[in-house]
């Protein structure tokens, strides 16, 4: 880690002139990273939309086979975690170390809860033969091909989202340890700030995934 | 080895049109290339550095020039666009009376079928002076049907039909290439197009295939797959009557309509529930895996041969399928 | 050694990149040599078809993803972008080092695939061949490109933030050197386009590994959807490769004619315009891929819009020479070569953008010739111009001028002899990626191979004299060319923190009166 050559507790890196410049740069960097993430998921959303347009009936049947209750619960879990993340960022601004740790831990627990529910859901898919492959079967459609495409998209999209959640959980763990060690103060809280941005982004992706995969065309199925 | 031609033969109606556009593009390209090369040479020599202490006058730019060299090239390119687009439009609209031929690409050969029943591999015999329409699909990967002498090319994609057409203008033997990389022997997926005098072609084609015409083949397949148990010609079956279906507009159960073309018939055989005809139940099983791409083409040709019935208004915009049973 | 592998100094990282991409360049060049030798005879006796297919695939993968895309941005950009805007380093030095490691890891994965047996899909990885039919190392190669893609994304991100937040006092946007503008535009594409390629490769990867079906026509999937996603990145990627080159040329033309670039703002904005418009034209790779006629027309129409900013640049560079004080130093010779070859490459782009012509020439040698004129005639000429121009600053040594001029000439001639015959081959109908070919194409193939051997000599010469100059070259002064950029206001090579005294910018770029003593006014 960079030494504190320019101040007592402030981690100003040598390429920057001021903390403000450093914070601006970090935040801008995170926003640009999130734009790349949007493009990344965008490719998948596009593929999903194309196929839903090709096979509306199959996608409706496949969508209604999803467990919307777990999906909705997970949506709630993530929304709560965004709230606790905001509280952690606020606590960081006020320099309340214990409260930062409290809310970061809460966020972490909610994140892990989401992943647990997700794992349970995937497991059910295996039992129901809804995993693409030779054993795949979905009731209510006669052509299994497009149904497999739906579930291929489902696993690719939720899998990638879950991977981002795992990364998020890793970041939160690191933040908790760093906060505990007293790295962050009211004057330097950029990592908490930009981790918050990342966490909200992953949350928003789910907000799009949930209706696309679980809710759209339920009435048709 | 041999002589060194600079342009390929022109052997279709579209070939001279493409070449004329090429001449225009070449003229523009050569003009600007000479202009830029000339200007660089001239300026470089005229204004070469004679002393290390030279400081040229500052010139920041000129709006008039910027506008000129944006607008003039833009105008020239718009000619390229519209000219090219109009050729492309012609290339994508086969004439109604075109001779129909089916092509199936597979690693690494071209299989071509005439309506009369002849089958060819890596060779295609066609008459001079008559438009030829190819309906193509692939059994495996993407291929591309390319005849340089005709200036036509179209990809051949698994899972769908694509079409191309050309009207040969010169008897002879022309290269057929696969232009989309398709695996190990891609460069050996080549063949010949034989353009024949119409009379010779008649002689060649009148022999017919060993098992009758393509539609006959399709008819036999229609029976052996038991399609005729449900699709009855009098409309009394559990499934829609196929007589006169081809080319008509079909009313679907979800309220939309679709034109019964080759692609629709293919989809209805392989994915029967994708589009359900209004008034019918989704009863039909899929034939995916039970019938080859060539078999599907034979069925399509059989269904085409079923209609329209003599006396029926051709191409009328009425749903061909009238639900009279639930 | 350790001080290099853990360095956070952008200049040292640039040198690491330079060594890496040079290795990949010669690897890709070796593949190209084998391809050209093989094509001397129509019946292809040197290697089998399988091997030939792997050769052109690995040539494409190596050159595009591991040489051209990182070449100018990661070496010259990394070294000079901070210097040119008066910063001590990039905004995120550790991420900069990480992105070099990502390129190395991606490169090693691709190398592993090549050594293990190679990959034969073509660098375009078209489905369903790549997902279902190919029996080669698709997964490792795709993974390598995926990882290298993140190197590119992080470099772009770093540059954007650096340009926005790290400029020296007085360095306003319109005082920035045009190289910085072009790097900025390039970075925009890297950040917006590369993730789409990444996700497309993830889908191909999943389809091969887990047998899920996204593009599989047997399940009702659409293999052409892959092409849309692929070209949504890979067409803008062409501009990732050529925009930095355009930036180098703007610098070189200005310095060696000692004049401000004609129409600075037009040149700057045309970079951004190319970056933006480049995202709207991917469909022109699919004119014969069964997309609708009207989609074809829209993409053709939009493609001509991208031509205009490129034309504006060429005209402005040429006009810069007018009434200048023109030096024939090696970088300038390469710049002349760039303008000429890029002009031919760009003009033939008009051919392939025209629907009627493209139906005939797509997937033929015409397209091969066209994009080599842009990628090799354009990008590599510019890269060479930049390497010669900045070599004294990077190493503190001058290169041998005579040898360098000779190499520029050899490369220019060899290049034209290699690729010009391919335009004719293509219009005659010679399809690309053909291992064996009809006899009538042989004469032109022999010419092309002859040119390639000249070109190979041309590329080996700088390799040798650059290394020679590290030890025996004359010591370089701080500003050997009389250039105005901030990078010339510090020692050659620059100190670790770039500037001993923080620079303050008071003039626009390219004001040569500020760097000259007593002058003779001309023009």
Image (cartoon, coloured by chain):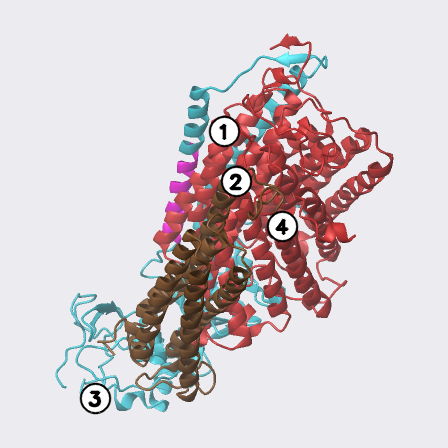
What is the CA distance from the residue labelled 1 to the residue labelled 2?
14 Å
- Residue at image mark 4: A2
Q: Is residue B38 left or right of residue A81?
A: right
Q: Answer whether labels 4 and 2 touch (C-beta < 8 Å).
A: no
Of labels 4 and 2, the one closer to you:
4
- Residue at image mark 1: C172
Magenta-highlighted residues: B76-91
**Subunit that carries the residue with mark 1:** C
What is the CA distance from the residue labelled 4 to the residue labelled 2?
28 Å
Above or below, C64 against B96 in this view is above
Task: State the residue at coordinates (70%, 58%).
Answer: C42
Q: Tell me, yes or no, whether the highlighted magenta stretch contains residue B82.
A: yes
Above or below, C206 against A134 in this view is above
**Chain that appears red:** C
Residues indicated by labels 1 and 4 sit on the same polypeptide chain: no
Q: Position of residue A10 (x, y in %)?
A: 55, 47
**Residue B18 marker:** none
**Subunit that carries the residue with mark 2:** C
**Subunit that carries the residue with mark 4:** A
Q: Foreground residue, B105 or C181?
A: C181
Q: Tell me, yes or no, whether the highlighted magenta stretch contains residue B104.
A: no
Residues indicated by labels 3 and 1 sit on the same polypeptide chain: no
- Residue at image mark 2: C184
**Chain that appears cyan:** B
Q: Foreground residue, C167 or B310?
A: C167
Residue C357 visible? The answer is no
Farthest right residue in view: C472
């Amino acid at each position: 880690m960079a030494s504190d050559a320019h101040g007592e507790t402030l981690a100003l890196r040598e390429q920057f002139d001021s903390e403000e410049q450093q914070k601006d740069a970090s935040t801008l960097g995170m926003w640009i990273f999130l734009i790349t993430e949007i493009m990344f998921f965008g490719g998948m959303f596009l593929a999903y939309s194309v196929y839903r347009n090709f096979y509306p009936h199959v996608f409706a049947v496949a969508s209604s086979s999803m467990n919307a209750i777990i999906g909705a619960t997970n949506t709630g879990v993530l929304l709560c975690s965004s709230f606790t993340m905001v509280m952690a960022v606020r606590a960081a601004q006020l320099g309340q170390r214990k409260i930062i740790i409290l809310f970061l831990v809460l966020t972490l627990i909610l994140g892990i809860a989401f992943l647990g529910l997700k794992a349970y859901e995937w497991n059910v898919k295996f039992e129901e033969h809804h995993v693409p492959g030779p054993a795949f079967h979905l009731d209510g459609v006669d052509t299994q091909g497009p149904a497999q495409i739906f579930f291929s998209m489902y696993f690719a999209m939720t899998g990638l989202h879950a991977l981002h959640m795992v990364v998020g959980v890793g970041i939160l763990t690191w933040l908790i340890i760093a906060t505990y060690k007293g790295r962050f103060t009211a004057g330097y809280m950029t990592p908490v700030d930009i981790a918050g941005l990342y966490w909200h982004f992953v949350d928003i992706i789910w907000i799009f995934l949930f209706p696309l995969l679980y809710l759209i065309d339920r009435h048709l199925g | 080895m041999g002589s060194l031609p600079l342009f390929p033969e022109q052997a279709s109606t579209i070939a001279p049109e493409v070449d004329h556009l090429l001449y225009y593009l070449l003229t523009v390209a050569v003009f600007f290339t000479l202009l830029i090369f000339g200007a660089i040479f001239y300026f470089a020599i005229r204004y070469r550095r004679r002393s290390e202490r030279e400081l040229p006058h500052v010139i920041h730019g000129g709006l008039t020039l910027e506008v000129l060299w944006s607008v003039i090239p833009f105008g020239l390119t718009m000619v390229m666009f519209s000219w090219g687009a109009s050729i492309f439009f012609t290339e994508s609209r086969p004439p109604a009376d075109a001779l129909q031929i089916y092509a199936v690409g597979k690693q690494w050969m071209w299989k071509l079928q005439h309506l009369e029943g002849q089958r060819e591999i890596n060779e295609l015999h066609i008459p001079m002076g008559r438009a030829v329409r190819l309906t193509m699909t692939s059994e495996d990967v993407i291929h591309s049907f390319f005849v340089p002498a005709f200036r036509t090319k179209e990809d051949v994609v698994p899972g769908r039909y694509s079409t191309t057409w050309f009207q040969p203008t010169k008897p002879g033997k022309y290269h057929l290439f696969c232009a989309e990389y398709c695996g190990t022997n891609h460069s050996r997926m080549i063949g010949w197009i034989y353009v024949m005098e119409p009379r010779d072609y008649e002689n060649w084609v009148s022999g017919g295939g060993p098992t009758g015409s393509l539609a006959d083949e399709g008819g036999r397949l229609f029976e052996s797959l038991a399609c005729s148990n449900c699709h009855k010609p009098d409309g009394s079956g559990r499934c829609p009557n196929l007589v006169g279906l081809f080319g008509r507009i079909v009313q679907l159960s979800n309220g939309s309509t679709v034109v019964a073309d080759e692609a629709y018939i293919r989809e209805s055989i392989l994915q029967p529930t994708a589009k359900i005809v209004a008034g019918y139940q989704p009863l039909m099983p899929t034939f995916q895996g039970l019938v080859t791409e060539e078999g599907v083409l034979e069925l399509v040709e059989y269904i085409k041969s079923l209609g329209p019935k003599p006396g029926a208004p051709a191409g009328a915009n009425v749903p061909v399928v009238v639900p009279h049973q639930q | 050694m350790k001080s290099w592998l853990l360095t956070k100094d952008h200049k040292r990282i640039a040198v690491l990149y330079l060594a890496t991409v040079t290795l990949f360049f010669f690897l890709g060049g070796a593949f190209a040599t084998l391809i050209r030798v093989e094509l001397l005879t129509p019946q292809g006796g040197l290697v089998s078809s399988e091997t030939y297919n792997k050769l052109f695939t690995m040539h494409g993968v190596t050159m595009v993803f591991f040489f051209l895309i990182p070449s100018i941005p990661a070496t010259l950009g990394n070294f000079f972008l901070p210097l040119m805007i008066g910063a001590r380093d990039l905004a995120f030095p550790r991420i900069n080092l990480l992105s070099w490691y990502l390129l190395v890891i991606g490169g090693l994965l691709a190398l592993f695939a090549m050594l293990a047996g190679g990959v034969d899909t073509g660098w375009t990885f078209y489905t369903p061949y790549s997902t279902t039919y190919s029996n080669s190392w698709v997964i490792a190669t795709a993974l390598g490109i995926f990882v290298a893609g993140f190197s590119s994304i992080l470099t772009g991100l770093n540059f954007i933030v650096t340009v926005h937040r790290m400029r020296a006092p007085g360095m306003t946007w319109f005082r920035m050197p045009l190289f910085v503008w072009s790097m900025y535009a390039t970075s925009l594409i890297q950040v917006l386009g590369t993730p789409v390629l990444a996700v497309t490769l993830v889908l191909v990867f999943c389809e091969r590994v887990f047998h899920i079906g996204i593009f599989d026509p047997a399940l009702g999937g659409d293999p052409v959807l892959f092409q849309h996603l692929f070209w949504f990145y890979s067409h803008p990627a062409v501009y990732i490769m050529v925009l930095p080159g355009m930036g180098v040329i703007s610098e070189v033309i200005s310095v060696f004619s000692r004049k401000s670039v004609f129409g600075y703002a037009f040149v700057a904005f045309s970079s951004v315009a190319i970056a933006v418009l480049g995202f709207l034209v991917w469909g022109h790779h699919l004119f014969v891929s069964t997309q609708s006629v009207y989609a074809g027309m829209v993409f053709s129409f939009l493609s001509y819009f991208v031509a205009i900013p490129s034309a504006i640049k060429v005209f402005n560079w040429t006009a810069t020479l007018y009434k200048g004080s023109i030096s024939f130093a090696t970088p300038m010779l390469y710049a002349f070569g760039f303008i000429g070859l890029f002009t031919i490459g760009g003009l033939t782009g008009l051919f392939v953008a025209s629907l009627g012509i493209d139906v005939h020439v797509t997937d033929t040698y015409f397209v091969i010739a066209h994009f080599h004129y842009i990628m090799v005639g354009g990008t590599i000429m510019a890269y060479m111009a930049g390497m010669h121009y900045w070599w004294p600053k990077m190493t503190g040594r001058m290169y041998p001028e005579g040898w360098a001029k000779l190499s520029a000439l050899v490369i220019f001639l060899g290049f034209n002899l290699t690729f010009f015959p391919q335009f004719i081959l293509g219009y005659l109908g010679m399809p690309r990626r053909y291992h064996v070919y009809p006899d009538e194409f042989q004469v032109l193939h022999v010419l092309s191979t002859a040119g390639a051997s000249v070109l190979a000599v041309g590329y080996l010469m700088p390799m040798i004299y650059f290394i020679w100059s590290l030890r025996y070259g004359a010591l370089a002064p701080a500003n050997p060319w009389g250039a105005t950029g901030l990078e010339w206001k510090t020692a050659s090579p620059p100190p670790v923190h770039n500037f001993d005294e923080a620079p303050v910018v008071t003039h626009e770029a390219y004001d040569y009166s500020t760097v000259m003593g007593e002058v003779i006014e001309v023009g």
